[in-house]
Amino acid sequence: MSEKIPGYQFIANTLKGYGLTHIFYVEAMLRMVNRQFGEMDVKRVMAHSENAAAYMADGYARMSGKPGICMSQSIGSANLAGGIHEAWLANSPVIAFTGKKPPTYQYRGCYQEADHRLLYEGITKFNADVSESEQLSTVLRQCYRAAVTGKPRPVHADMSNHTGRVIEVGSVSQPVMVEEKYTQYPAFRPAAEQSDIDLAADKINRAQKPVLVLGRGAAISGAGQEACGLAKKADIPVVTSPDGKALMDETDELWSGIVGEYGMDCANRTVMDADLVIFVGTQTGDQTTLAWKVPALSTEVVQIDIDPTELGKNYPNCTGLLGDAKVVLSQLIEKVDKADHLPWKEIVQGYVRETLDEYEEKQNRDTLPIRPERLCMEISKTLPGDAVLVADTGYSAVWSSTMLRMKPSQKYIRAAGSLGWSYPASLGVKCAAPDRPVICFTGDGAFYYHLNEMETAVRNGINTVTIINNNMALVQCRPDLSLVYKDQMDLIHERYEYPDVDFCRIAETYGCWTRQVDKPEEIGPAIRDALACGRPAVIDIRTERAAEIPMALIPR
């Protein structure tokens, strides 16, 4: 019989065996495990909120290709769930550990107690109740297996005692087992059926106006090179969702813009006009397709996805290719004919030139306050070749995805929907990629959510650069508020505007390097100095509140 192992050692040894380098948490969950991590060279990053800890683990997972780990005690479980919801939306493999009162305390009105499984049931692939230490052998391996297979998504394990102490002090009779296959994602790279490849290739060969749409799944698969290979062989224009940004060089002649609600007119026009749309790793949701108008539902599509339930879900006129995007694209490259779609390509390039020319006028303005378009152009010019840009949701995602030109040596990661995500997530990204420049692009409204994590960054030496597009307002709310208050416009300002707060003074208190920027020509030097300062850096850039985002699809 195997020698029994204390629960805390079993957890620590298992997680370390699966490649754990960082854990993100709020005190006081699994304290004995955490002490063990201190002897294992695992970096313990204590955050100021459970929500932020989950965002950090999410950023780490998206950057590292490995599951991110976060944890909180019982009362913090609901806060942690808010962060796990973002990971669910983003197909990010985060593993969450929470504590709960033991079974004998359940259903008795105990302090800080609720049914945590209900909080996590709709936002995890695997949701375990761990009341005995002997369950750890099965549950921990299943956490990793579920998180990284198929469509990556978060998992949750709720451990007995509000800090998990019952599980820590118990014993496990099974030896620690690490399944190497599940230490990273994608865990499996299945190929599509050859008959389906043949059918899809035939449709691509016959199409006169095809377009490739690269989404989050293409990025998760690391399929950028294969997508470009297919595009160049078959002469197919390429658009991406914001999540697919930087998979293709955005100066390439086949690059045709960012598609969808947070996208560009040129990309949406291209997809609308196409006679064949090839979706690669996108859920064809409402944001990517402008509520299923781009393309029209009758359009013929080829859809590549690792999840069979996605194939044809929103576009019934579909040839579905079930498999890993990188592998399936390689299969298609072998089967499609070399083609020349010059007339179609010239039309699309005209769309792109028209859109970029429209952007250029605002990007070159020297007006004050600074135009967001000019801010993004200056970031593009200054962004290091290996930089990772982490963008918030809303207008931060729109400005950065449409106005920044990026290339495959760089990486773009954006919030899947949670305002305030970007700053703590960028800390997790930097933990996963300590040698790469990590730049967070956020608005002032988003930065307010988790600005206390500046202290976390300084305490742990997590040296990101945060650029605040500071228009002193929640500008994305303005259009709808203008409708709601159309007969009381004098009241609208107090609904979405903020006072002039000096973020630099706050950041300096925490120990960050700071600079406030009021002129366009100061943006580039500020970013370069921030990247070289050797500390967490915050750049407060004052921008024009009245600026509106570019229209995703201009009515004609």
Image (tube, helix red, strand yellow):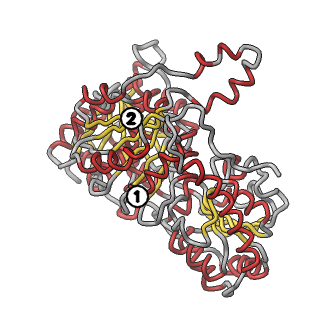
Disc 2 element? strand
Left or right relative to 450: residue 322: right
* Camera-nearest residue between 433 and 440: 440
Name which residue lies at 31% across and 36% down.
515
Crowd tier of the residue under label 2, counting other residues whose Cα lies within 10 Å: few below 14, some 14–19, many 20 or above: many
Where does residue 455 sit, x and y in percent of width and height? Answer: 27, 31
Where does residue 511 sit, x and y in percent of width and height? Answer: 22, 32
Disc ID at residue 126: none
Disc ID at residue 65: 1
| Number of marks present in the image shown | 2
Name which residue lies at 52% across and 40% down.
367
Where does residue 388 sit, x and y in percent of width and height? Answer: 40, 54
Farthest front residue in view: 366
Crowd tier of the residue under label 1, counting other residues whose Cα lies within 10 Å: few below 14, some 14–19, many 20 or above: some
Rendering quarter of residue 27: top left
Earlier-in-chain disc, 2 versus 1: 1
Name which residue lies at 74% across and 62% down.
271
Q: CA distance from mark 2 to mark 1?
A: 31 Å
Q: At label 1, which amino acid type do we have?
A: Gly
Residue receiving disc 2: 540
> Taking 156 as reference, is 63 above or below it?
below
